[in-house]
């Protein structure tokens, strides 16, 4: 059961990673990018259309992570402690902290994207909240993979 | 609903307060509850294994605080959000929108700082 939940957690994280990366690049891409260019295509989609999906995927991913964390604490972490993988455990702690802070940011992020016209401080807030969430998602994804592969990662 | 000024004040205050309170909960070890996954029990408040057993036996009943820290932050943030929604708009219109991203980023940095001991072991 934990393996199934972990795989599901990973698959949802992949979808979340794609959506948040697309939205972030679309937000920060040059406004006057050449139409046929890479950034021009990113600009061609509505970045706001990803918002609801990102919120749902983040919440589901966090919930699955919270479930699988119970198994991690009882079955995996004692092994890592005995083997002295202190840095890996520290990275995982940062992952859990960022995950919670990201959850707390979601309502504000959602409201920022629901507003059709934003400028000035509100526009900056929307862009930076999106970038912050993207950073959290990327961090959690990479650290999750490193932890999952600890016995193979780095020997 | 999302265009309501009160709702906007609620979510902005919630997001800001959640991040700050999470960092405070982490620093102060203020978990609303403690989970013991191997025993399948949840105890109210922050409970350390040394309160009930010898520290060397802590591995028998590993404690989890993350759920409790998150719950502490969520509860506190809800209160802050409700207060922000209820106060007159004229009290808050001068509040800078940037706090909603600046304080969470500062809280993330604080969490990293508080995790540094792991990397010195």
Image (cartoon, coloured by chain):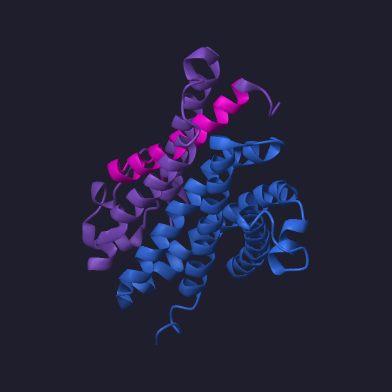
Chain colours: A blue, B purple
Extent of the magenta region? B6-34
Q: Position of residue B11 (x, y in %)?
A: 56, 31
Left/right of residue A132 with respect to residue B6 in the rendered view:
left
Residue A66 is a magenta residue: no
Q: Quadrant of residue A41?
A: bottom right
Q: Relative to the observer, which residue lies in front, A98 or A28? A: A28
Q: Relative to the observer, which residue lies in front, A78 or B56? A: A78
Residue, x 42% and y 49% (percent of image)? B66
Q: Position of residue B100 (x, y in %)?
A: 48, 37
Q: Is residue A118 above or below residue A26?
A: above
Q: Position of residue B71 (x, y in %)?
A: 47, 39
Residue B10 is a magenta residue: yes
Left/right of residue B79 with respect to residue B8 in the rendered view:
left
Q: Can residue B68 be spotted in the picture?
A: no
Q: Is residue B47 above or below residue A135?
A: above
Q: Can residue A124 be spotted in the picture?
A: yes
Q: Quadrant of the C terminus of chain A?
A: bottom left
Left/right of residue A5 with respect to residue B89 in the rendered view:
right
Residue, x 28% and y 60% (percent of image)? B116
Q: Position of residue B15 (x, y in %)?
A: 51, 37
Q: Is residue B24 above or below residue A77?
A: above
Q: Relative to the observer, which residue lies in front, B22 or A30? A: A30
Q: Main secondary structure of the magenta part?
A: helix
Q: Relative to the observer, which residue lies in front, B81 or B48? A: B81
């Amino acid at each position: 059961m934990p393996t199934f939940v972990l795989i599901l957690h990973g698959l949802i994280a992949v979808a979340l990673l794609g959506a948040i990366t697309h939205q972030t690049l679309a937000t920060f891409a040059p406004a006057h990018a050449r139409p046929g260019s890479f950034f021009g295509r990113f600009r061609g989609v509505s970045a706001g259309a990803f918002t609801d999906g990102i919120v749902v995927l983040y919440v589901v991913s966090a919930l699955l992570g919270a479930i699988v964390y119970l198994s991690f604490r009882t079955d995996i972490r004692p092994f890592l402690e005995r083997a002295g993988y202190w840095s890996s455990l520290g990275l995982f702690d940062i992952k859990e902290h960022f995950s919670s802070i990201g959850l707390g940011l979601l309502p504000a992020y959602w409201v920022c994207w629901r507003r059709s016209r934003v400028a000035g401080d509100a526009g900056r807030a929307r862009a930076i909240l999106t970038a912050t969430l993207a950073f959290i998602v990327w961090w959690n994804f990479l650290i999750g993979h490193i932890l999952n592969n600890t016995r193979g990662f780095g020997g | 609903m999302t265009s309501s000024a009160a709702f906007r004040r609620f979510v902005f205050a919630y997001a800001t307060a959640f991040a700050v309170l999470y960092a405070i909960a982490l620093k102060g070890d203020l978990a609303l509850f403690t989970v013991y996954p191997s025993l399948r029990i949840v105890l109210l408040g922050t409970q350390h294994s040394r309160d009930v057993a010898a520290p060397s036996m802590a591995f028998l009943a590993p404690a989890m605080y993350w759920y409790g820290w998150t719950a502490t932050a969520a509860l506190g943030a809800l209160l802050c959000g409700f207060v922000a929604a209820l106060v007159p708009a004229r009290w808050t219109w001068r509040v800078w929108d940037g706090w909603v991203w600046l304080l969470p980023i500062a809280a993330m940095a604080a969490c990293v700082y508080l995790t540094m001991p792991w990397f010195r072991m």
